[in-house]
Image (cartoon, grey):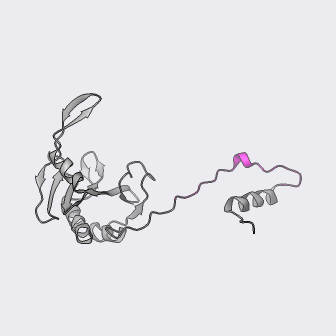
Amino acid sequence: MATITFTDRLVASLRRSAPMGAAPAFGLVVLVLAQAPPAPDARLTAADVAKVTGLAVQQVARGSKPGAGMTLNFADAAGLVLGVNFGTDALYTNAKTQATVSVMGKTQPMPLVHALVPGVGDEAFDSPPGSVQWVLYVRKGHQAFSISTFLARGTTPRLTMDQLIALAKIIVGRL
């Protein structure tokens, strides 16, 4: 039994619509296939993010948009809103103890800890240092994650730290 694909149907349709004796203009057809949506992740869903933030978000696949490189990525009509990376407790420890970063062979100071955030997991801190924070690192047992919002304009985070903390508490409860 032969399997007929979408492409086979498209080609057949183009052939039927071409004038008798004319070759269909396949070179002019651009076919855009949508990437399948990512499977929902029980640790944090689009419904969770929408409830906490009031934004109409959807989960988007890693790599489907510039900046969507995290394990979980959420966007609304204006763009990326939130990303979450999961890992072992080493993710947390490495971030907490980072003091420098090497860029093009030069070592630059780059600590990540701004302040400890009590009441989230076994331990947590917000980042980066300075007047505006948009990342929260959390450890629970041997598991860890970072939850980050994106910047809307310059250094204005799309979500508040209180919203990131509320979302982090949801994740901690599901680890």
**Main SS type for the magenta part?**
loop
Q: Quadrant of residue 103?
A: top left
- Please provide percent x and percent y for residue 102: 24, 33
Looking at this view, name the residue that lies furthest to the right.
21
Looking at this view, name the residue that lies furthest to the top.
105
- Please provide percent x and percent y for residue 25: 76, 48
Q: Residue at x 72, y 60 (%)?
A: 8
Position of 118 with respect to 85 (left or right) is left
Frontmost residue, 127 versus 159: 127
Q: Residue at x 15, y 58 (%)?
A: 124
Question: Is residue 22 one of those drawn in magenta?
Answer: yes
Q: Quadrant of the C terminus?
A: bottom left
- Please provide percent x and percent y for residue 116: 11, 55
Q: Residue at x 30, y 29 (%)?
A: 104
Which portion, as a residue range, is magenta?
Answer: 19-35
Vertical relation: 56 (above or below) 61? below
Q: Quadrant of residue 53?
A: bottom left
In the rendered picture of this protein, how many numbered marks are placed on residues? 0
Position of 69 with respect to 117 (left or right) is right
Looking at this view, name the residue that lies furthest to the front.
142
Q: Quadrant of the N terminus?
A: bottom right
Frontmost residue, 31 versus 122: 122
Question: Is residue 162 one of those drawn in magenta?
Answer: no
- Please provide percent x and percent y for residue 123: 14, 60
Q: Residue at x 29, y 50 (%)?
A: 151
Frontmost residue, 94 versus 104: 94
Vertical relation: 15 (above or below) 105? below
